[in-house]
Image (spheres, rainbow, N blue to C red):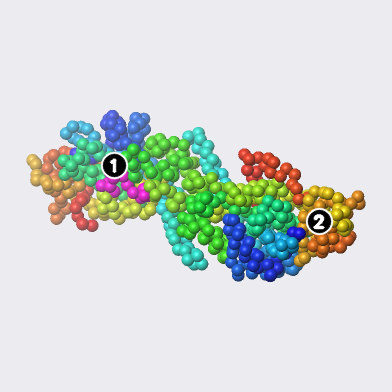
């Protein structure tokens, strides 16, 4: 059985393994033992702190495979993308250069350094053991965080953001970095990405060129990489767009990977999540039903599993004893349930020709 | 050979000159109406009918033997007053981080109108047949270049503090500017020649409307384009050398189209302005001996009928300069008149 729970100190070796196997390497999850140890301690503080407004808390979760007895994935929520320091992105902007004299109007695309995303809650640092890719475990790991946020809205911002790893070529090089950041840092992409993870990304951002960049002056390859996700993350992006996130004007400052954003109240899992009292039934007696994420109502002992969304005629969620035990709930306790399947998941609800840009409030 | 202000009857010859100048020579487009207006504007300037900041002083080099115009040069009283005047300023941004062990400086181009209000020496052109190896000893190019310092010195109160000169940038064998190809072409829906032509005609508002307003980090430019920054066309090197010898310096300003350098100086610091002085004229009958190579430059001191030419000799210790009849005739002076004289070989 697979369960999502807060990270513990004993998970350190597993985190190290997951950080090392993430493709591409994640800025937010550097394979650096001290940083990972800090990450665990920081998460433990967040789960036990009394929080009235979102701040510097990082909540790190793991996917625990109880049958195998190992941790198979991890994911984090940063209550504020830039709490103590700014969270920098490049914002895609269009300037209109019009000349009455020549009777022409030109759209001049630029990238401007921005820290508007700093206020948003950031879903980040997700790494999953490759053996689970494409299973319901992947969706659970990614979206259990929404189940947590739904229960503790005061701890998070109304707008959620996610940054996806950007496009890399066959050699693992970022064409965007090679055309932009490299001029200023004289370091290759993997190196700067690791440094950003170990130190902090914003401190590097502060050394980035501060004036807007004219796209016309970047290489063709770099322009093509803007807002383009790493191929390995395409299914994840599709799932989150189906969840209700929108592509934004923002892209990552290193590799130009897309930043998506979602208004909490408009996301499918928030809208469809419902509280149900638990009724425990033997596993063989449970009726067939669609899979759903089921989360308990405990902050520090948060648990979320995938179970059948089987309701009794009186609206109780029927759970097997094993699931109830994993969630730490007894009969009669309320759990939060949301269907795992997303309607319109990547079936064209996002028009390929319409980037679905927000109106700039993020 | 003598320099004089352009006159109404010069229009045909001026247009013939304009045809020979070619791409990159912005200020002399082959456009008859424009050139006629230029002549009218010059006449108004010399007659002081226009405000100081709109005055264009346009001079021609006249070949008295043939009656043809051998070249031209000009002074703009003040640039940027009526039509905006743009440059890129090449600046340096430090880019450093102790934690990253990083210390770099990034060359950056900033759009600027810093030169608004300065005077400009411009439009220097000498026809090829007057500048070949066999004509070098006549120093016609030097005459055209330096006459302007005598004019600025003589009429100093009509000019601002600073003077600049824009030098033609680098073009390849096909007449293409690598700087333009890499930068301007992305922002202007016309080719260099067209853009240049409009600029020459004074129709420059499109520059402000279409030019990138944010600074340009030069590492984003191609190597060929970066190599053009502050560099001149090979034919322009002698002209640049002459201006530098007068004390004009490149302070990092370049042309926004071709990347060519703009050199500048405080007018009072320019060698020809500092060292030229007024002398009394004494005319001797017949002809006098001349230095083998022209050295002494003379200009008249009246705005009306201004002219200038090489003299065969310099003034004596008492500040009296002796002219033979031909020289007096050329400069239209008589004994007792005053000339402004510059020893072009005197060490500064």
Magenta stretch? Answer: B227-240
Name the residue: 32% across, 36% down. B22
| Residue at the extreme right of the image, as rendered | A314
Residue B203 in magenta stretch: no
SS at circle 2:
strand
Location of mark 1 (residue): B124
Name the residue: 63% across, 61% down. A18
* Residue A130 vertical position relative to residue A238 in the rendered view, above or below: below
Q: How many angstroms separate mark 1 from mark 2 (CA)?
A: 83 Å
Crowding around mark 1 (Cα neighbors within 10 Å: few <14, some 14 to 19, many 20+) is many
In the displayed structure, does residue A282 sit left or right of residue B312?
right
Front-most of residues B211 and A19: A19
On the question of residue B27 being in view, the answer is no
Front-most of residues B198 and A60: A60
Front-most of residues B197 and A305: A305
Name the residue: 47% across, 64% down. B102
Crowding around mark 2 (Cα neighbors within 10 Å: few <14, some 14 to 19, many 20+) is many
> Which image quarter holds the N terminus of chain A?
bottom right
In the displayed structure, does residue A208 sit left or right of residue A279?
left
In the displayed structure, does residue A86 sit left or right of residue B88?
right
Q: Please provide percent x and percent y for residue A81.
A: 65, 59
Q: Please provide percent x and percent y for residue B265.
A: 33, 53
């Amino acid at each position: 059985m697979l369960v999502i729970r807060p990270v513990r100190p004993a998970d350190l070796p597993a985190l190290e393994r997951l950080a090392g196997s993430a493709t591409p390497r994640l800025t937010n999850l550097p394979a650096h033992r001290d940083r990972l140890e800090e990450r665990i301690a920081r998460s433990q503080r967040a789960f036990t702190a009394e929080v009235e407004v979102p701040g510097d808390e990082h909540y790190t979760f793991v996917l625990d495979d109880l049958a195998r007895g190992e941790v198979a994935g991890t994911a984090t929520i940063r209550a504020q993308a830039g709490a103590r320091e700014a969270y920098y992105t490049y914002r895609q902007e269009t300037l209109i250069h019009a000349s009455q004299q020549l009777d022409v109007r030109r759209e001049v695309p630029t990238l401007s350094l921005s820290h508007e995303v700093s206020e948003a809650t950031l879903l980040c640092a997700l790494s999953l053991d490759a053996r689970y890719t494409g299973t319901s475990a992947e969706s659970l790991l990614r979206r259990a965080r929404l189940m947590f946020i739904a229960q503790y809205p005061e701890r998070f911002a109304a707008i959620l953001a996610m940054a996806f790893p950007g496009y890399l070529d066959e050699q693992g090089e970022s064409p965007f970095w090679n055309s932009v950041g490299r001029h200023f840092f004289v370091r290759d992409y993997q190196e700067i990405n690791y440094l950003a993870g170990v130190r902090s990304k914003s401190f590097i951002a502060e050394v980035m060129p501060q004036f807007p960049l004219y796209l016309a002056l970047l290489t063709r390859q770099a322009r093509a990489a803007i807002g383009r996700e790493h191929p390995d993350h395409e299914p994840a992006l599709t799932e989150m767009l189906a969840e209700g996130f929108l592509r934004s004007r923002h892209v990552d400052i290193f590799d130009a990977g897309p930043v998506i954003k979602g208004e909490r109240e408009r996301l499918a899992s928030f809208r469809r999540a419902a509280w149900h009292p638990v009724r425990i039934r033997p596993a063989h007696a449970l009726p067939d039903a669609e899979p759903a994420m089921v989360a308990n109502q405990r902050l520090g002992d948060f648990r979320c599993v995938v179970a059948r969304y089987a309701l009794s005629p009186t609206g109780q969620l029927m759970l097997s004893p094993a699931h109830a035990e994993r969630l730490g709930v007894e009969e009669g306790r309320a759990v939060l349930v949301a269907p795992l399947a997303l309607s319109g998941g990547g079936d064209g609800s996002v028009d390929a020709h319409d980037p679905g840009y927000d109106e700039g409030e993020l | 050979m003598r320099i004089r202000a352009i006159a109404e009857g010069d229009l045909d010859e001026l247009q013939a000159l304009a045809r020979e100048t070619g791409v990159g020579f912005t200020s002399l487009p082959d456009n008859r109406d424009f050139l006629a207006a230029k002549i009218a504007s010059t006449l108004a300037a010399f007659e002081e009918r226009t405000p100081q900041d709109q005055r264009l002083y346009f001079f021609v080099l006249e070949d008295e033997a043939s009656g043809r115009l051998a070249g031209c040069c000009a002074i703009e009283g003040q640039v940027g007053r009526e039509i905006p005047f743009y440059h890129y300023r090449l600046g340096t941004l430090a880019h450093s981080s102790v934690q990253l062990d990083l210390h770099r400086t990034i060359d950056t181009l900033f759009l600027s109108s810093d030169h608004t209000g300065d005077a400009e020496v411009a439009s220097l052109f000498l026809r090829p047949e007057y500048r070949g190896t066999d004509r070098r000893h006549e120093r016609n190019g030097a005459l055209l270049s330096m006459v302007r310092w005598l004019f600025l010195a003589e009429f100093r109160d009509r000019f601002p503090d600073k003077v600049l000169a824009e030098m033609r940038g680098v073009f390849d064998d096909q007449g293409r500017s690598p700087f333009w190809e890499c930068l301007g072409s992305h922002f202007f829906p016309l080719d260099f020649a067209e853009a240049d032509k409009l600029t020459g005609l004074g129709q420059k508002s499109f520059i402000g409307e279409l030019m990138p307003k944010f600074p340009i980090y030069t590492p984003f430019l191609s190597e060929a384009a970066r190599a053009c920054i502050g560099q001149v066309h090979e034919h322009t090197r002698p002209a640049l050398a002459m201006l530098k010898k007068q004390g004009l310096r490149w302070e990092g300003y370049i042309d926004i189209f071709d990347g060519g350098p703009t050199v500048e100086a405080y007018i009072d610091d320019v060698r020809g302005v500092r060292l030229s002085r007024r002398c009394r004229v004494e005319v001797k009958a017949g002809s006098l001996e001349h230095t083998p190579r022209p050295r002494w430059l003379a200009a008249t001191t009246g705005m009306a009928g201004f002219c200038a030419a090489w003299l065969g000799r310099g003034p004596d210790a008492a500040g009296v300069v002796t002219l033979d009849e031909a020289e007096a005739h050329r400069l239209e002076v008589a004994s007792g008149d005053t000339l402004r004289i510059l020893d072009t070989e005197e060490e500064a």
